[in-house]
Image: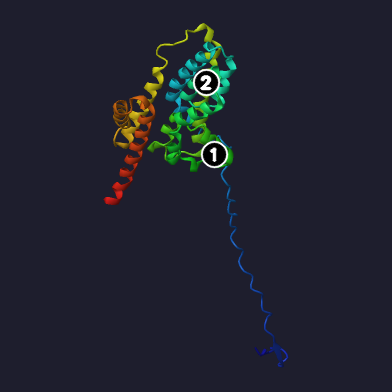
Amino acid sequence: MPSSTHTSARGGHVQPATDPPPTASVPPPAASVPPAPASVPPAPVPPGHSGLKQAVRDTGSVGLALFPLGVAFGVLVSHQGLAWWWASAISAFVYAGSLEFLLVGLIVAVAPLAQIAVTAFLVNFRHVFYALSFPLHRVTGATGKAYATFAMTDEAYALSTAPAAASWTKGRILWLQVFCQGYWVLGATAGALVGALLPERLVGLDFALTALFTVLAIDGYKARRDLPAPVLALVCALVARFAFPDQMLLAAMALFTAGLLARRYVHDRKPTRA
């Protein structure tokens, strides 16, 4: 822009008047904004710790049956002339419930390994079907899956496959199985240690298992409201009793397994027809 001029009052001459230098525009100070808080990740849960307290509550009623049954097993081991540690070893490494009672007699009789293997297969064949619906997919890690498979007993299966257990975590499932086996091992060890002071047959302890499965069956029926498994088992037992009297146990278990599979097939088809 050209410079402007003005007339001096004293000299009469004209003096150029220059414009003042432009001032640099200074932006106003920015408002102080507090820094955003850094995102803090949640504290990691220690491995195997999650679900410990819940598993204690879940297995409370089951332990009332498993511990006395373990005591009865330990008493049997003691009265068969075996050392007390046999009860601890069998209950810890075999952990197969009714098979353990049969195994004591087979050990005392020095039965061949083939006979023991066939007996174990027939008695525990039902566990093959347990694996179809047991929540093993929620247990991660090779060690966890191996133990969950090993400790898949009737009690652990009944508790972990109930509708209320659909959201159970890996830790809760594993701790449940650990506590179930712990009750059994402790009972067996205690029974073997004091076996010499107890009679060979403790009246009433054998009914603990019947009472336990009765309670589990009632809970299962209330949760699912379908054909009660005890009714199906009774029908299979009656059919096997009159149709296959010499092989009643094997026939009844086979019929019961087939009945459970048929019930599951009908149950899965109901939504499709609807």
104 sits to left or right of 229 = right
Q: Distance between the residues labelled 2 and 1?
A: 30 Å
255 sits to left or right of 96 = left
Q: Where is the N terminus found, in terms of image quarters?
A: bottom right
Residue 269 vertical position relative to residue 11 in the rendered view, above or below: above
Q: Residue at x 31, y 47 (%)?
A: 269
102 sits to left or right of 9 = left
State the SS at label 1.
helix
Q: Say how the picture is coloured.
A: rainbow
Which residue is tagged 2?
Answer: 106
Residue 52 visible somewhere in the drawing:
no
The count of marks equals: 2
Which residue is tagged 1?
Answer: 145
| Nearer the camera: disc 2 or disc 1 | 2
| Mark 2: amino acid | Leu
* Nearer to us in this view, 169 or 87: 87
* Nearer to us in this view, 89 or 211: 89
Picture coordinates of residue 222, whole percent (x, y): 31, 33
- Callout 1 crowding tier (Cα within 10 Å): few <14, some 14–19, many ≥20: some
